[in-house]
Image (cartoon, coloured by chain):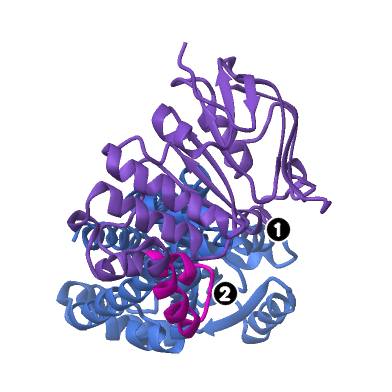
Amino acid sequence: MEEKNIIIKFENVSKVYKGGFPALENINLEITEGEFVSIIGQSGAGKSTLLKLIYAEEFPSVGSVYFNGKSLGELSRGKLPFHRRMIGTIFQDFSLLSKKTAYENIAYALEVLGVPDAEIAEDVPQILDIVGMTDKADKFPHQLSGGEKQKIAIARALIHKPLIIIADEPTVNLDPDSAMEIMELLMKINSFGTTVVLSSHHKDIVNKAQKRVIVLENGVIINDSPNGKYKLN
Amino acid sequence: MRGGWLAFISVSVLVLSMCVMNIFYVVGNSINGFMQSVQEKESVSVYLEPTLLDHEIQEIKADLENNPDIKSVEYISKEVALENFKKDNADEDFIMQALQEIGENPLLPVLVVKAHNHNQYVKIQDYVQNFQFSEKIARINYEKSREEMNKLNSIVENIRKIGIRLGIVFVVISILIIFNTIKLVIYAQRKEIKIMRLVGASNSYIRLPFIFSGIIIGVMSAVIATGLLFALLKFIDQYFPSIIPSGNLVMFFMNNFWKLFGAQVAFGVVIGIFSSLIAMRRYLKI
């Protein structure tokens, strides 16, 4: 049996914010490459914090976070950008630049990394096709629906070919149909081999995926099941 | 639109500080030049007993010329002194009449002594009062320029102090304004910066535009300030040509152009980069 790479590992991780607010307590978890993981819990349970620790927006107060075997705590500030290039992030507020078209928003992610124009011209249309937004390429964000904007955000997160996609409540501002579309898109991306970690409190969505579910409550993991069903207490 | 306004204010304030410093620099230099020419005229006049023989006067002159503090000794005989006096006062009937009445030459022979350095005059006076020929000296007259020199000195000192203080105030204001400008630009671009960060753009890629803005503000201000300085000097030359005995100001500017311009560019760039850096340190989360 092929030994799969552990891409993310949390080892006794606790996070206390300034002012003594404990966001996470003693988190231990492992995520292997290619998994599709949903992290669920109520607001304030610590979902966002957990994700931020993965893309190194925050650092643990106690314990270590490992990405692809390397401890994030040992990363110098100069090396952080390179860590982030392996991760694609998606947020609930889409974060698109309003003065750029859909195409330009995606291309921007590559421009900023110094990718040559020719390569950009090749890759962006491909990604647009994957997310099914080819015919909206030259629309501006205000001309797109919530679901469409999120698809562009996903495209931008994917364009630099990351190892893992981190999605922080990607469906929370969407209507049920769009939310479903986004979930399906994420699962499609996962099927290509990209690890997906998302946080949510949309129970139907998560249950439909029938994939691993980690439940967070008050900063502590209370359940971690491979085919979990989301139960609201 | 807002960006343009901000840039305008930043540049203006920096230009102002440079102008303040330029003005004080020019004024300081001018006064220095002026003081030097006044110093040239400074001297000690040693009046000799009218009965002295020529060889005695030459002896005294030689002695004084040997003194290391003394730069030059000019001998004006009483005949020459009388001629000069008559020339100077040719229009004054009263004086000319009085001269005729007296009949003989009332003036004394004099040795006009100039020092190398303004500070040496006290020493020279002491020396003359006590040296071997002191009985042959009728009186010593130290030109009153001493008091005026001291007055000028203290004025220059005050001007310099005010200049430095004002300069510092303007520099601080410039730094604050540029700092604020960059801060606002960072804020305006926060979305782009966030995306750049998350996508993994390198830190220098994110920082460079702001440093660049700082540099541009500095260079533009230097160019404008130098231009204004030139205009100011030209104006002074045109309307107040006699202020500087040493020559015209535009020439001074031309000769020192690269030094002046270079200094201002360096100054502008340093302030620009410095302000930009502290704004980034505070507001740019990398």
**Chain name for mark 1:** B
Q: Position of residue B210 (x, y in %)?
A: 44, 61
Q: Residue furthest top?
A: A233
Quarter location, residue B27: bottom left
* Residue at position x 59%, y 19% in the image: A219
Chain assigned blue: B
* Residue at position x 39%, y 61% in the image: A131
Chain part drawn in magenta: A106-127
* Residue at position x 63%, y 63% in the image: B120
Please give the residue where the numbered disc 1 appears in the rendered image.
B130
Magenta portion: prevailing SS class: helix
Determine if residue A125 is in view: yes
Numbered disc total: 2
Three-letter amino acid code at disc 2? Lys
Please give the residue where the numbered disc 2 appears in the rendered image.
B114
Q: Secondary structure at mark 2?
A: strand
Chain assigned purple: A
